[in-house]
Amino acid sequence: MVFGTGSSSTKSTKGVEEVGGNLSVLIVDDDPIILRIHRMMLNKFGLVTHVVENGKEAVDLFRSGSCFDMVLMDMEMPIMDGPKATQELRAMGVNSMIVGVTSRGLESEKQSFMGAGLNRCHEKPLTTDIVTSLVQELIKHY
Amino acid sequence: MDVVSQLQRQFLDFTTSLYREGFLDDQFVQLQKLQDESNPEFVIEVVSLFFEDSEKLLNNLSTALQQHIVDYKQVDALVHQFKGSSSSIGAQRVKNVCVSFRNYCEEKNVEGCFRCLQQVKHEYHLVKSRLDALFKLEQQILAAGGSVPMIA
């Protein structure tokens, strides 16, 4: 339950829907509760999940050569926030699906986060229906 | 009625009352649906994280509001965090107080903020004691050889 400064990964072999191939998701969030919930949801779909606690760790992972099919990016984080990390990833040429998650409901803030280079943006916590649609989009396009 | 059925009935009645009285909302149901045999303690783990997080947040809020010059941005950030975490586990009444709390932060209304702090502490302790009781009932059902009923 304690997530250190490095990333960690788990895979569930009992997904609700087993997806073809080992699709991987990087969860970027400083909230341990959200991390636990989102990780559980994604594992149920048979996705391999890795977690980091801020945008800089996400950027460093990609820079070191790691690759993920999808990134779940929290908006507000210490050290480097979601919009900044998203901009940096896109500037690096990262084409992965990046989904923003925000606890703020303001449309203007969502639009601003989208403008940083997201594919989609949702309020947290994500629901099972939203995760289903994200996984379906991931399979179709990536 | 045997012991297991009695406990299960108690569990269902208690759970229904928690939703009816607004202590929990649908998000808690979502968490329960995620729990399975390979993660049988998932809900307790997440709720325990919430309890740990909340104790720290409440201490930090008390400290922040006792400052000679209150930093409302800091208070707002803490309340925002509390709103997020309570919302994540479905602690509806705690979340609702956080919404009012943030409005008082925006108005820089120190008395309003203090009232909300007392209210949010109160609601947090209410939901904590109810969740502790719920988990205790679950353990009793399992110890008696029964299974924990799910509210659909």
Image (cartoon, helix red, strand yellow):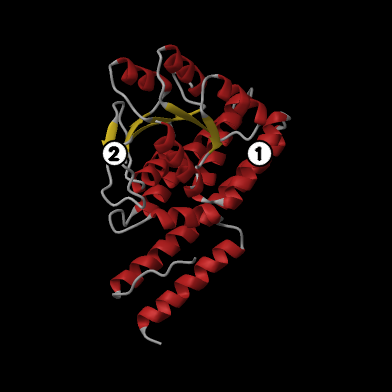
Is B24 in front, or is B31? Answer: B31
**At 55% across and 36% down in the image, what residue appears?**
A122
Instruction: Look at the image and tell me in which quarter the N terminus of chain B lies.
Output: bottom left
Task: State the image coordinates of residue B8 (x, y, percent, origin top left).
Answer: 42, 75
Regarding residue B62, the answer to whether it shows in the image is no
Residue position marked by numbered label 2 in the rendering:
A21
The residue positioned 42% from the left and 17% from the top of the image is A89
Residue B115 appears in the picture as rendered: yes
The answer to which image quadrant residue B18 occupies is bottom right
- What chain is tagged by disc 1? B
Q: How many marks?
A: 2
Name above or below for residue B54 compared with residue B70: below
Secondary structure category for the residue under label 1: helix
**Residue at (66% x, 35% y) in the render:** B102
Residue nearer the viewer, B128 or A46:
A46
Q: Which residue extends farthest front?
A: A140
Across and down, in percent, residue A113 comes to: 56, 24
